[in-house]
């Protein structure tokens, strides 16, 4: 719950929501669910309120580490998993176009999920803006950039180029690499390389790797490669991830796997006594994109849920800002990170006013290459080759509820596709909105709520704010 009393702050919060939505779906980024706002005139605080709903994690990484280190230093493999998964989250940010810079990477912004994996959080300082100082910069411009840096970064993790703007080094995504170097140092040696953010030490790159350390020698050169004074000499995030993969292969470790050492010392896996999410069992149709029905799995739902969200006045400004940021002019809504709903892609004359088929294809190939399947709920059709033959034709009538057999087949087909690969997504499209609501509500939202009304409300927040139409509700 974020409070704001000025327009500039409102924009910053909306940008944070946009970035969270854009990054959501990566296994090492905290999962975004929804956002809403309450105008200051309607708020008890006299300020605008922004509400952001995310997955619930097990806790902060630092708390888990403290408990483990009471019994001795962490193993080299545990450090590897923590750091690799953190780097994967940063790599996901830097791969965006333009690259997203976190700017406030620190150990406190790493969480542990209920599955035992690392989740990066807090994107309130993130930006796509890089600075390239040169001798033409005025003192006033340097002062403005310095103020921005002060507001958005933590002193101990600031880079030499941030502290000394007159060095004229670029201030870009390499600042995240420096911060990752500080995090790895801290994971290995239980202290920060630049305690209290000592400016002279940072500017001169003055830190020391303990001479007597034999436990973490495999990371010494990596630390040095990240804590270079000149940002252009630092490793890129891809080079860093590749080196970590080589270390993992040499040590025979799966760096993506749950960090069991931390969880064993902190009460094990689980969600504080909550029941595990319901799984879909006994699926016998293996003919869906080569799926194996005997591998288990199922839709994963966020733990818990709430009965009524109707007291949150969902002014569609937030949702619409998020939507336009992530998809340009396309009519597509991510109901979850792995299920999207869109209007029927059009060709010819229709394409001028609806989702253009080619635009849709380019968007899906660019964002989910090789990992999307399309579910056409309409009686209209097009060449399946448009979407690499990963198209299921349902042939449902517009403005009519589908029969249960057909609905079950669709859900089963989706389930088999999604469980094959964590990167797979399902794209549902229709002509009137109502049938897509039916198709998505059943597997996604009904397990979270005890009333259909609450599930419909959640769908409407995702797809058609500020509310779903009465016919679709029926």
Image (spheres, grey):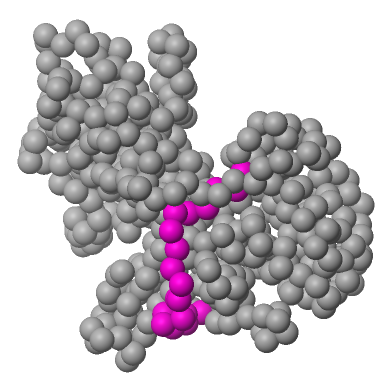
- Write the residue at 31% across / 81% down: 48
Residue 390 seen: yes
- Write the residue at 78% across / 75% down: 432
The residue sitting at the bottom extreme is: 41
Q: Quadrant of the C terminus?
A: bottom right
Q: Position of residue 467 (x, y in %)?
A: 58, 82
Q: Main secondary structure of the magenta part?
A: loop
Quadrant of the rendered image containing residue 197 = top left
Residue 400 vs 64, above or below: the answer is below
Q: Position of residue 273 (x, y in %)?
A: 35, 48
| 311 within the magenta span | yes
Q: Seen in the image, is 437 located left or right of residue 396? A: left
Residue 225 seen: no
- Write the residue at 73% across / 35% down: 293
Q: Quadrant of the N terminus?
A: bottom left
Quadrant of the rendered image containing residue 428 = bottom right
Q: Position of residue 276 (x, y in %)?
A: 47, 46
Q: Seen in the image, is 302 located left or right of residue 45? A: right
- Write the residue at 67% across / 36% down: 420
Residue 275 vs 209, above or below: the answer is below
User: Start and end of the magenta stretch?
Assistant: 298-316
Quadrant of the rendered image containing residue 351 = bottom right
- Number of callouts: 0
Most foreground residue, 210 or 84? 84
């Amino acid at each position: 719950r974020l409070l704001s009393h000025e327009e500039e702050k409102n924009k910053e919060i909306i940008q944070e929501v946009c970035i969270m939505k854009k990054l959501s779906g990566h296994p090492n980024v905290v999962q975004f669910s929804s956002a809403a706002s309450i105008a200051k005139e309607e708020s008890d605080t006299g300020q605008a309120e922004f509400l952001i709903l995310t997955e619930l994690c097990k806790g902060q990484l630092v708390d888990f580490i403290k408990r483990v280190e009471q019994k001795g230093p962490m193993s080299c493999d545990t450090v590897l998993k923590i750091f690799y998964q953190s780097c994967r989250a940063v790599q996901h940010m830097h791969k965006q176009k333009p690259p997203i810079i976190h700017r406030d990477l620190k150990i406190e912004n790493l969480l542990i999920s209920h599955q035992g994996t690392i989740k990066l959080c807090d994107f309130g300082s993130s930006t796509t803006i890089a600075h390239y100082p040169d001798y033409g910069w005025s003192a006033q411009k340097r002062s403005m950039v310095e103020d921005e840096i002060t507001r958005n970064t933590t002193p101990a993790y600031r880079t030499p180029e941030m502290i000394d703007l007159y060095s004229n080094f670029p201030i870009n995504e390499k600042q995240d690499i420096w911060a990752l170097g500080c995090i790895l140092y801290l994971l290995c040696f239980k202290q920060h390389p630049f305690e209290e953010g000592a400016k002279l030490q940072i500017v001169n790159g003055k830190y020391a790797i303990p001479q007597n350390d034999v436990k973490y020698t495999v990371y010494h050169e990596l630390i040095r490669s990240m804590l270079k004074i000149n940002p252009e000499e630092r490793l890129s995030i891809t080079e860093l991830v590749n080196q970590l993969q080589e270390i993992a292969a040499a040590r025979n470790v799966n760096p993506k796997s749950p960090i069991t050492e931390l969880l064993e010392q902190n009460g094990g896996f689980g969600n504080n006594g909550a029941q595990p999410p319901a799984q879909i069992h006994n699926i016998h149709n293996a003919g869906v994109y080569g799926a194996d029905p005997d591998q288990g799995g199922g839709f994963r739902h966020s733990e818990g849920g709430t009965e009524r969200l109707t007291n949150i006045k969902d002014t569609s400004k937030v949702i619409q800002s998020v939507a336009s940021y992530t998809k340009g002019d396309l009519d597509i809504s991510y109901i979850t990170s792995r299920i999207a709903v869109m209007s029927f892609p059009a060709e010819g004359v229709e394409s001028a006013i609806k989702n253009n088929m080619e635009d849709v294809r380019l968007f899906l190939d660019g964002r989910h290459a090789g990992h999307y399947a399309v579910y056409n709920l309409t009686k209209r059709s097009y060449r399946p080759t448009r979407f690499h033959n990963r198209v299921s034709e349902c042939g449902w009538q517009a403005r009519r509820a589908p029969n249960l057999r057909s609905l079950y087949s669709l859900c089963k087909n989706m389930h088999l596709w999604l469980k094959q690969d964590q990167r797979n997504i399902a794209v549902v499209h229709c002509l009137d909105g109502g049938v897509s609501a039916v198709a998505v509500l059943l597997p996604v939202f009904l397990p979270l709520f005890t009333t259909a009304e609450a599930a419909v409300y959640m769908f409407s927040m995702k797809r058609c704010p500020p509310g779903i139409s009465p016919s679709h509700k029926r």
